[in-house]
Amino acid sequence: QVQLVESGGGLVQAGGSLRLSCAASETVFRVNTMGWYRQAPGNQREEVASITSGGTTNYTDSVKGRFTISRDNAKKMVSLQMNSLKPEDTAVYYCNADLQVRAYLRSRNYWGQGTQVTVSS
């Protein structure tokens, strides 16, 4: 039972832009904080950006001013607009969200399947 589905990603030259999107299953009761993480080969997974249900955002320092996270609560979607991409942004990007799947269940943390972003120099 898939709860988070990602789209976007791909190959882009340095200085270019990409947009990632992630949608929670339509049947999910409530979507709380959503975010994006990334993991480059040999590195630990790191948080890139997050956004609460109220719209409060947080970014890791290395992407501030270049990446923008946004969400559409009606569509249960989160997006990450990535501009001025650098080779060091190359990684697998994962959507992450706290989802209350049913009204009678507690909120749990879920991961998307991951999407590759490759920035060439």
Image: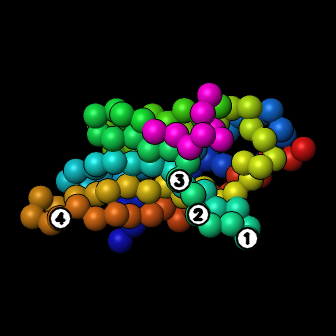
- Give the residue drawn at x 73%, y 67%: 41
The reply to whether residue 33 is in sight is yes
Measured Cα–Cα span from mark 1 to mark 3: 16 Å
User: Is residue 68 placed above or below 35 in the rendered structure?
Assistant: above
Image quarter hosting the N terminus: bottom left
- Residue type indicated by callout 1: Gly
SS type, badge 3: strand
- Crowd rating for badge 3 (residues with CA inside 10 Å; few <14, some 14–19, many 20+): some
Measured Cα–Cα span from mark 1 to mark 2: 10 Å
Image quarter hosting the C terminus: top right
**Contact (CB < 8 A) between labels 1 and 4?**
no
Q: Earlier in the sequence, mark 1 or mark 4?
A: 1
Q: To which residue does mark 4 refer? A: 106
Foreground residue, 110 or 40? 40
Q: Earlier in the sequence, mark 4 or mark 2?
A: 2
Magenta part of the protein: which range? Answer: 58-65
Query: Mark on residue 42?
Result: 1
